[in-house]
Image: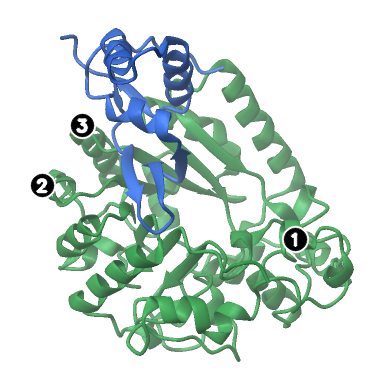
């Protein structure tokens, strides 16, 4: 096997608490089960270990990272050990004073989520008044000199307004716009029938983005990745494979090869409270299990694509087939590919109400 | 095609940072969702992106490396950085 690569990125989900209720959240469904949170000292140690391991980019996220009272200390600590610090926020708990403090603490990049282009539609999807505060956070952050990314998750209920999203990003003069098609894990999987767009919507979206690029995006870098379920023959290389370039630490200290891996039952994940990050990266069984290609069943095992897409997304494979080692059903070579077709058809047929993200320990009915 | 205005006093854009990666032994330029590995000459140029004019930058390099003619490389490299949104124009001196 090749020499073990060192991670480039660490996703630090510092809390699952969040004032918003976005119906596509990638956090677990049974949020009340995970109220345990690491203390400040532990996170600072994790950041130090991450830097020593070779992590370049830290992504502070959650839930809503800014609800942590020690968030400034965490940002300062990460900055001090030389990590490039990014933060993803819903921005409802932030004001100009807090932005200034984040800037002084050394935060390098702010990513603000937006659900739709108008207050009414945005607030309906978040199930919380939030549009104005998001806008104010973007404008305030720009004034302070932050690079700002606007992150808009796309699905059937807002995809038709993709042109207006781009226009809004230009009006607010963000540096980057991430047009992120919903990935069906976590709450998005629960709400899949309400969120999956039509083929026509996706084709239209693609055209709108290309037209905007051709017309000149006025300083906004647009990242737009079409979802894999309609147009692709082969799946995406998810994270370049587990245990290759990134790792994720959950609020309670569990270390995951992918942030949604914990919803796969039967897998064991190590904790930062028991091991160093280096020990986990190098030795934890769950990190080694999907490195390389030896673990692959057919058709991946003898496929020419195996070192290009690594069999696709483990979480998607599990959610659709019940088998974490299965070929991602997106792949047209997967024996389970019909499951994707069925999901698409189900989404065309039905329009169920959205189930908003709430903290609950009861199993959420699917 | 994105048009970018001419940059006279190159500086790193907000949120673009040079760092030395001691784990990988390499010079890096890090920015949102990205990173470039710099070679020695790229590093030398980046470290002179402190608000001086491009002409002053070239002159400094010529002094540091006698016999060199860095102008073409400097313009090409700065152009690449500018195209990726990694530079801004500093105040006129």
Q: Among all residues in the image, which is located at the extreme front?
A: B67
Q: Quadrant of the N terminus of chain A?
A: bottom right
- Residue A40 or residue A243, whichever sits in front: A243
Residue A198, image x, y percentages: 73, 48
Q: Earlier in the sequence, mark 1 or mark 2?
A: 2
Q: Chain of mark 2?
A: A
Q: Which residue is mark 2?
A: A97
Position of residue A259 relative to residue A305, above or below, is below
Classify mark 3: residues with Cα within 10 Å, few (<14), some (14-19) or many (20+): few
Q: Earlier in the sequence, mark 3 or mark 1?
A: 3
Q: Chain of mark 1?
A: A
Position of residue B69 relative to residue A5, above or below, is above
- Residue A21 or residue A124, whichever sits in front: A21
Q: Are marks 3 and 1 in contact (CB under 8 Å)?
A: no
Q: Earlier in the sequence, mark 2 or mark 3?
A: 2
Instruction: Return the mark for residue A143.
Output: 3
Residue A84, image x, y percentages: 32, 51
Element type at marker 1? helix
Element type at marker 2? helix
Task: Supply the letter of whichever chain is blue.
Answer: B
- For the image shown, how many numbered marks are present on the structure? 3
Cα distance in 3D space between marks 3 and 1 = 44 Å
Q: Are marks 1 and 2 in contact (CB under 8 Å)?
A: no
Q: Chain of mark 3?
A: A
Element type at marker 3? helix
Instruction: Return the mark for residue A307.
Output: 1
Task: Supply the letter of whichever chain is green.
Answer: A
Report if residue A306 is visible in the image.
yes
């Amino acid at each position: 096997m090749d020499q073990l690569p060192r991670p480039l990125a660490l996703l630090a989900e510092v809390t699952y608490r969040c004032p918003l209720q976005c119906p596509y959240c990638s956090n677990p469904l049974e949020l009340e089960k995970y109220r345990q949170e690491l203390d400040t000292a532990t996170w600072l140690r994790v950041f130090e270990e991450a830097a020593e391991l070779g992590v370049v980019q830290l992504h502070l996220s959650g839930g809503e990272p800014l609800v942590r009272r020690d968030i400034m200390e965490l940002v300062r600590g990460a900055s001090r050990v030389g990590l490039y610090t990014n933060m993803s926020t819903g921005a409802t708990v932030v004001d100009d004073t807090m932005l200034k403090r984040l800037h002084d603490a050394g935060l390098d990049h702010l990513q603000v989520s937006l659900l739709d282009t108008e207050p009414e539609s945005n607030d309906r999807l978040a199930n919380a008044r939030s549009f104005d505060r998001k806008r104010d956070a973007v404008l305030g952050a720009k004034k302070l000199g932050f690079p700002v990314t606007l992150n808009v998750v796309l699905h059937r209920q807002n995809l038709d307004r993709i042109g207006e999203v781009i226009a809004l990003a230009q009006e607010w003069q963000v540096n980057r716009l991430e047009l992120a098609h919903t990935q069906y894990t976590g709450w998005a999987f629960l709400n899949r029938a309400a969120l999956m767009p039509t083929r026509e919507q996706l084709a239209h979206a693609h055209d709108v983005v290309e037209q905007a690029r051709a017309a000149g995006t006025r300083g906004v870098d647009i990242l737009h990745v079409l979802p894999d379920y309609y147009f692709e023959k082969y799946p995406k290389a998810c994270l370049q494979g587990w245990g290759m370039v990134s790792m994720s630490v959950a609020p309670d200290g569990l270390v995951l090869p992918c942030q949604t891996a914990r919803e796969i039952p039967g897998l064991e994940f190590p904790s930062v409270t028991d091991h160093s990050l280096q020990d986990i990266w190098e030795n934890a069984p769950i990190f080694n299990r999907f490195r390389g290609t030896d673990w692959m069943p057919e058709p991946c095992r003898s496929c020419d694509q195996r070192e290009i897409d690594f069999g696709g997304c483990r979480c998607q494979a599990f959610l659709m087939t019940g088998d974490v080692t299965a070929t991602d059903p997106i792949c047209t070579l997967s024996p389970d590919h019909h499951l994707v077709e069925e999901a698409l058809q189900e989404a065309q047929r039905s329009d169920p109400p959205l189930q908003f993200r709430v903290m609950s320990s009861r199993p959420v009915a699917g | 095609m994105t048009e970018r205005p001419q940059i006279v006093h190159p500086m790193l854009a907000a949120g673009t940072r040079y760092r030395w990666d001691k784990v990988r032994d390499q010079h890096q330029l890090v920015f949102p969702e990205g990173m470039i590995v710099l070679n020695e000459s790229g590093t030398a140029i980046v470290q002179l992106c402190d608000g001086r004019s491009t002409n002053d930058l070239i002159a400094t390099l010529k002094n540091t490396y006698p016999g060199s003619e860095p102008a073409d490389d400097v313009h090409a490299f700065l152009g690449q950085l500018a195209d990726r949104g990694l530079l801004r124009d500093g105040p006129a001196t």
